[in-house]
Image: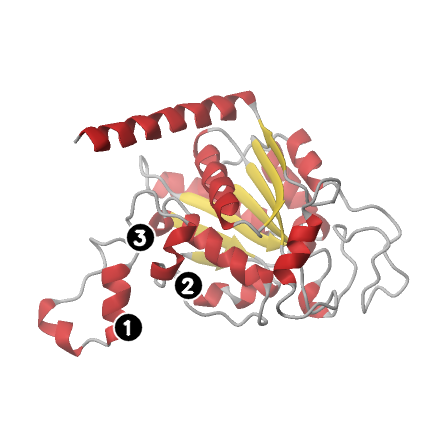
Amino acid sequence: MSKEKIQICPEFYDIMPPEYRDLVEQATYGKEGRGWKDIGQSKELIESHSLCAGCPESMAFRYILASLPNPEDTVMVGSTGCTSLVFPMVAVHNIHSLFGNQNAVASGLKRALSVRFPGRIKDVVVLAGDGATVDIGLDMTLQAWFRQEKFTTICFDNELYANTGGQESGLMRKGFVAKMAPVGKTFDKVRLPEIARESGCAYVVNCTVSKPNLVEKVIRNAVLIAREIGPTYLQLYTPCILEIGKNSMEGLQEMRDSEKPGERFRYYEYVTDSAKQFLADLEAKDKQTAATAIEA
């Protein structure tokens, strides 16, 4: 998917639907430095979805897709859950795995792509919910990190099983009462970011998706570090407003409340020394490029 690959034949241009002409002419694929501010033009990646009105996952999807460094050469691996309702509407190559085995599928995919396309960058990004990541799929999540598989894992943490009635997950906070967890969670939220750090991830972030510029930064960092250094992990709070008893307009405030100092989604970042050096070199390169452009 690039400007060179998708073009409208001049003979057919006048009869093509205006929506398609706009998609091709205003698309962001192939654009250097693309990010969340390009959401209005990134219709080629996602335009509509079937999630609930006001769902924070829909915001997260748009920010992530707009921030992928190289969407035309990215393959996303999803799992059963609310995210699987969106992937059919996403114009980035994606695979729907069995519930919980997304990191095993991504491991084989990343290796196969390196053989099939030697010398060409092919990013693999896993995106799954907390049930697939820390409950049913924890074994395969950890083993991918132990093996130092070079791809990014993103967990949409809504702290329960959102699309099956509100069952308890390992990432549900202690004491929370859900429709299908009436006695409340009896133990603390599993500290998966810390586990990811101890399991060999080169870059780990725990945050909400209330700030699009922050999401853009961590997505870019995670994908680029995974290319060169090793596995990366992002845990993003995307609360299920339906299951926690909020109105459709309250998702953003829920995330803001949960990221305050002392709260469970206060910003947390871990970066290995090698990843820090990589990001510093990347920043220096970007500054040099910007300076050269100004001089020109």
Residue positioned 81% across, 65% down in the render: 178
Relative horizontal placement of residue 205, taking residue 22 as reference (left or right): right
Q: Secondary structure at mark 3?
A: loop
Amino acid type at image mark 2: Ile
Q: Secondary structure at mark 1?
A: helix
Q: CA distance from mark 2 to mark 3?
A: 12 Å
Relative horizontal placement of residue 154, taking residue 92 as reference (left or right): right
* Crowd class of label 1 (few under 14; some 14 to 19; many from 20; radius 10 Å): few
Amino acid type at image mark 3: Tyr
Most foreground residue, 52 or 261? 261
Amino acid type at image mark 1: Glu
**Colouring mode (rainbow / by chain / secondary structure / one colour):** secondary structure
Instruction: List the residue tagged with mark 1.
Output: 19
Residue positioned 55% across, 57% down in the render: 97
Instruction: List the residue tagged with mark 2.
Output: 46
Q: Are the two marked residues, 2 and 1, in contact with CB atoms closer than 8 angstroms? A: no
Q: Secondary structure at mark 2?
A: loop
Residue 132 makes an appearance in the image: no
Q: CA distance from mark 2 to mark 1?
A: 13 Å
- Of pointers 3 and 1, the one earlier in the residue sequence: 1
Residue 29 numbered tag: 3
Image quarter where the C terminus lies is top left
Residue 63 numbered tag: none
Residue 262 placement: quadrant = top right
Image quarter where the N terminus lies is bottom left
